[in-house]
Amino acid sequence: MDSKKDVEKYVETCREELWRNIFRIEIEYLVANLKGCRDILSVGCGPAIIEGELAAGGFHVTGLDVSQTALKCAPDSVRTIAGKAEEMSFPASSFDAVIFVVSLQFVEDYQKALQKAAGVLRPEGKIILMLLNPQSDFFKEKMAEPDSYVNFIRHKNLQEIEEAASEYFSISGEYMLGIKGDDIFASDDPSRSALYVISGQLLK
């Protein structure tokens, strides 16, 4: 999302009822799993729509993204910094949690991004990786749309991502968020769940 037109199109899409409902479920999941955390880093935040809601809920949120254009659309409640995930330069022990909300798979060197994330966390800090599930019908439908953001994905192998994360975190994974057309439902079926979520804690 480097151009102003792309960002405006994305923000407009996010206002659609389907995406507002998807974001609501993602926000609820994040809030439930970020209990005990205050300072949150969201990597690849874009215009920080979800991050703004987290900030409204009392979290201190920093958003990192490569696109300065996208960051200009972020709410004032979110501290924003332009930069690459692989080159984040925050001091050690800066955050209680690092989240990647459907962003890690688009990062060129996701292994380096995970290493950097581990380096900026406080002891026992949390990681949450919300990943697109390539096995899902939702993913396959989006891949068939020429102008879909999904076509820019770099990494589809969830097992490899999980193995990379396990170098720095004690992790668990779960499928969630079934999407079929305009319907959203709970699902842990790999063919129906649009997301695979890896969460964990920094290894000692």
Image (spheres, helix red, strand yellow):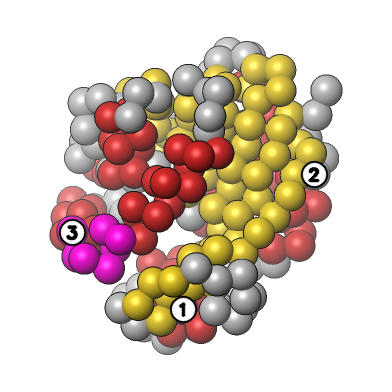
Mark 3 lies on a secondary structure that is loop
How packed mark 2 is, by other alpha carbons closer than 10 Å (few <14, some 14-19, many 20 or more), is some
Q: Do the residues under discs 2 and 3 have CB atoms within 8 angstroms? A: no
Q: CA distance from mark 2 to mark 1?
A: 27 Å
Along the viewing direction, whichever of 20 and 115 lies nearer the viewer: 20
Q: Which residue is mark 1?
A: 138
Tell me which numbered mark, 3 or 1, is placed earlier along the sequence.
Answer: 3
Report the amino acid beneath label 3: Arg
Report the amino acid beneath label 1: Phe
Q: Do the residues under discs 2 and 1 have CB atoms within 8 angstroms? A: no
Q: Give the x, y percent position of residue 146.
A: 36, 81
How packed mark 1 is, by other alpha carbons closer than 10 Å (few <14, some 14-19, many 20 or more), is many
Q: Is residue 149 left or right of residue 4?
A: right
Q: Which residues are magenta?
A: 15-21
Mark 2 lies on a secondary structure that is loop
Quadrant assignment, res 44:
top left
Q: CA distance from mark 2 to mark 3?
A: 35 Å
Q: Which residue is mark 2?
A: 166
